Image (cartoon, rainbow, N blue to C red):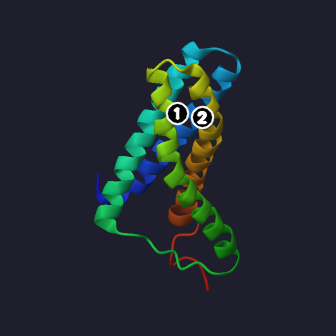
Amino acid sequence: MTINDLPAINASFNAVSTVFIAMGWFWIRRNVWQRHVPCMILALISSTAFLIGYIVYHAHAGEKSSGYTGLIAWIYFPLLISHILLAFAVLPLVIVTLIPTFQRRWDRHRRIGRWTMPIWLYVSVTGVIVYLILYQWFPPGSVLK
């Protein structure tokens, strides 16, 4: 494994997070907290692994500029900007959502979780899409200008 393998691994962690966030939401909507809890723990572990891999990759490889223009740029950059802005918000939101669980303050956890879940899910999904656009579908240099 090399540093260049990290974007694919990170996207995989994001995909795993997406699945477990969605499953956790599915179970809690049906009042099955016994299945909700392990799903959310796995989503948290996967998201944490992603964040560590992301930091390691960008500390070594730097930022990858796309150089996109035209239609791809019109799709990619708004997606990327919304992903980045919400990614900054989701980390503190997840922490603030998690704290009441240790205090057994389910009302507070539920109230904050209603905001956290869709943002966390969006960030996970768009993270995978950003990876696919940047590394698989339209790698920089492959797009005609």
Q: CA distance from mark 1 to mark 2?
A: 6 Å
Earlier residue among tags 1 and 2: 1
Residue 43, compared with residue 74, is above or below; it is above
- Rendered residue at 64%/21% (across/down): 27
Residue situated in front as seen by the camera: 31 or 60:
31
Residue 39 lies left or right of residue 3; in this view the side is: right
Place of residue 124 in the rendered image (x, y in percent of width and height, measured from the top left): 56, 46
At which x and y percent is residue 103? 45, 20
Q: Is residue 40 above or below residue 50?
A: above
Q: What is the x, y in percent for residue 57?
A: 34, 59
Q: Which residue is mark 1?
A: 97
Question: Which residue lies at the image location 55% right of the left edge and 31% below the top edge?
Answer: 20
Please tell me which residue lies in front, 140 or 86. 86
Secondary structure found at label 1: helix
| Residue type beneath disc 1 | Thr
In front: 88, or 35? 88
Rendering quarter of residue 142: bottom right
Identify whether 120 is placed above or below 2.
Answer: above
Q: Which residue is mark 2?
A: 112
Q: Badges 1 and 2: C-beta atoms under 8 Å apart?
A: yes
Quadrant location, the C terminus: bottom right
Report whether 135 appears left or right of 76: left
